[in-house]
Image (cartoon, rainbow, N blue to C red):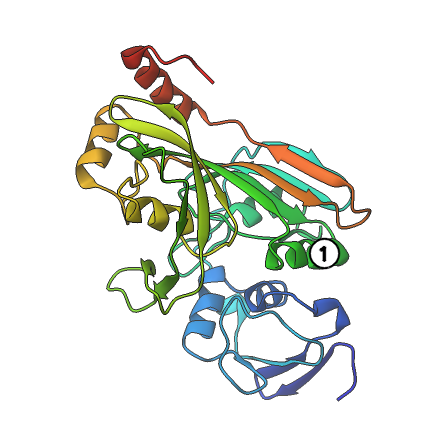
Amino acid sequence: MTSGKTTVKTRQVERVVAGVEDLGRRLDNFLLARVAVPRQVVYQWIRTGQVRVNRGRAKPSYRLKTNDEVRVPPHSPEGQDRSDAPVPDIPVPVLYEDADLLVVDKPAGLAVHGGSRIRFGLIDVLRQCRGEDAFLELAHRLDRGSSGCLVLARNRSALLGLQAQFRNRAVQKTYWALVAGQWPEHVREVRQPLRVNRHHARHRKAVADESGRDAYTRFRPLDQFARNCLVEARIETGRTHQIRVHAAEAGHPVVGDDRYGNRQVNGWARERGFRRLFLHARSLGFAHPANQSKITVRAPLDTACKKLLASLRDETGTPSL
């Protein structure tokens, strides 16, 4: 099999061979760039095994290798019900931009990409704003409920360089979270392996399990309030829902966390008009993939988080950061 992209059609099935330019690209993004069907259809294909890589099943996050053969099932773009009202124009603040990178402040509640139950994500909003033909790929992920710094690549070489840094734990990631209770001074780190339970009744859920993958989070109290604490969390690993699970394991779940949190604490927050997860990707530090210069980007808290903190400081007389 020769390198470079070729396509062999068998009736309506396509067998696409990944070229050098596709090296390291996620399977879902590879497909979405090549077929004019709704995003949820692509994820259904992968989930049901209609998409195959080298004749075997693969996950959406599988990263392609040169000469991988991808089976694309029969599809008729004209006949598909795209159920797509246009992607809405959602403001996404830009924190840093150059010819290789784009760092944005992801709004809370906006998924980074669409899925079987999510019609669109941040990547769709940005591509619509900047033009469908512009190269723009996610270098990493944030939970849908989280806000803050998110890095995207504007060309293939930048994408591979950024992904290597995330994979090698060379990126400095700092989060702010408001947690229940007053964080104990002696608890500065949580080392607890995590395993993702993919057979949970309603959704994926990470659980603390010694058979899971290693996960390490360092916590530092920033502000103590009567019933809550604002903490800084630095993650050395990037596991699913890592900060949320580790905070809950320490007995101080994140405010607004409807998956690992405390129902009474979340109800208290809603009574105050706060209806999001208080988890914010405060800063990212990494080497520029083109010239290795140090890049540090910070994202301010959004209005909802600032308002809640202001009310807590008024009650306790705690000065602002």
| Front residue of 32 and 257 | 257
Kindly give the residue lying farthest to the right in the view shown: 291
Label 1 Cα neighbours within 10 Å, binned few <14 / some 14-19 / many ≥20 = some
Q: Is residue 246 above or below residue 2?
A: above
Considering depth in this image, is 34 or 320 the residue closer to the camera? 320
- 37 left or right of 64? left
Q: Nearer the viewer, residue 307 or 169?
A: 169
Among all residues in the image, which is located at the extreme left?
Answer: 264
Which quarter of the picture shows residue 199? bottom left
The residue drawn where x is 59% and y is 44% is: 172
- Amino acid carrying label 1: it is Gly
* Residue 68 place in picture, x, y as percent: 65, 80
Residue 102, by quadrant, is top right
Which residue is tagged 1? Answer: 161
SS at circle 1 = helix
- Residue drawn at point x = 34 percent, y = 22 percent: 308
Q: At 46% from the left edge and 27% from the top edge, which residue is drawn?
A: 302
Quarter-of-image position of residue 19: bottom right
